[in-house]
Amino acid sequence: MEQPEITYCSPEMEQTGLFWMPMQQAEQGLDGLLGDLELSLENGTACRLQMENYRARDDDAVLILKLLEEPRDEADLDEWLSVSIAGGLHPSLCHQQMECRKSGRRGARKRRTSPWDTLFFRDIPSQRSGGYIRRNNSHWTSKEVKLLVQGVSKFGVGRWSQLKKNYFKTSVRTAVNLKDKWRNLLRAYKGNVQKYTLLELEPPLVEQIRKLGAKHPYPKQRHS
DNA sequence: GTAGGGTTATCG
DNA sequence: CGATAACCCTAC
């Protein structure tokens, strides 16, 4: 596998262990689990990265990648980093115009807000309302949904951290995210017909969601 | 750690 | 611009 060109960002970024990467080169990751991307090193070992699509959009996309686990040979890792890192680049310089469209309907657009705004764009006045910073803004892939449904059918509804541990270990999704997504799925497919759904799911999967939803009522009750 | 109400970005 | 999806807040 061709070694991807990875640009290492600002010094502040260094501490976070995050990388930026042109979307085209991580395209395979788009259809996979958000968060999982495997890179082959020259010596044959693999190096796993976490993909986070903050700031990733359709046409000028940059992905942030986080090193998940070290390659077995640490010397290889060092070499790999020294080869890949350009160093000191401001993220805005990393932005590239490139076509990155999924076939069929337009891929979900990514939100622009990111927790790194304060890191990179300190000078830009933050006009966030609500008093908090949204941490992740990425739409779920059908693979993720499949995993979630699989997990719910195995562990039941409500054991989100268990599910996280077993099915979303390296994913950016938190246990709360899983819970919220399940609620959204039920809202989308249970009884009431929505006007539209963002993500087209295969009928069998929808059927499975319906059945699980009927089996384990959720949400249960409302508390004021 | 989870349930469920609230909030906001993005889609159609 | 209304609806939906993703996310946040927080009582328990």
Image (tube, coloured by chain):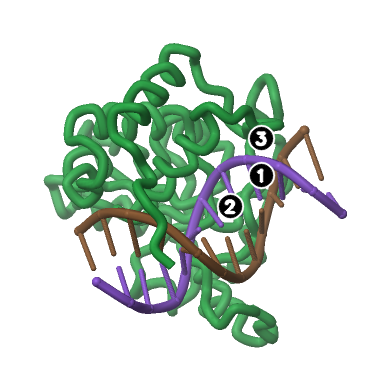
Chain colours: A green, B brown, C purple
User: Observer-nearest residue: A187 or A71?
Assistant: A187
**Which mark sits nearer the N-terminus, 2 or 3?**
2
Write the residue at 55% across / 66% down: A114
Element under disc 3: loop
Q: Residue at x 35, y 47 (%)?
A: A220
Up the image or down, A162 lies above or below A14; here it is above
Report, in whole angstroms, how far the alpha carbon at label 2 lies from the one at label 3.
Answer: 11 Å
Chain identifier of the residue bearing label 2 in the image: A
Give the letter of the chain under mark 3.
A
In the visual, does A150 lie left or right of A32?
A: left
Location of residue A12 in the rendering, given as x and y in whole percent from the top left corner: 43, 79
Residue A33 in which image quadrant: top left
Q: Are marks 3 and 1 on the same chain?
A: yes
> Looking at the image, is mark 3 or mark 1 nearer the viewer?
1
Count of numbered marks:
3
Q: Position of residue A222 (x, y in %)?
A: 41, 57
On whether disc 2 and disc 1 are found on a single subunit, the reply is: yes
Q: Counting other residues with Cα less than 10 Å from the Cα at mark 2, is it few (<14), some (14-19), or many (20 or more)?
A: many
Closer to us: A7 or A68? A68
For label 2, the residue is A62
User: Which quadrant of the figure contains the C terminus of chain A?
Assistant: bottom left
Image-quadrant location for residue A217: top left
Residue for badge 1: A109
Q: CA distance from mark 3 to mark 1?
A: 12 Å
Which mark is drawn over residue A100?
Answer: 3
Mark 1 residue type: Arg
Label placed on residue A134: none
Element at badge 1?
loop
Residue A62 point in image, percent of width and height: 58, 52
The kind of residue on which mark 3 rests is Cys
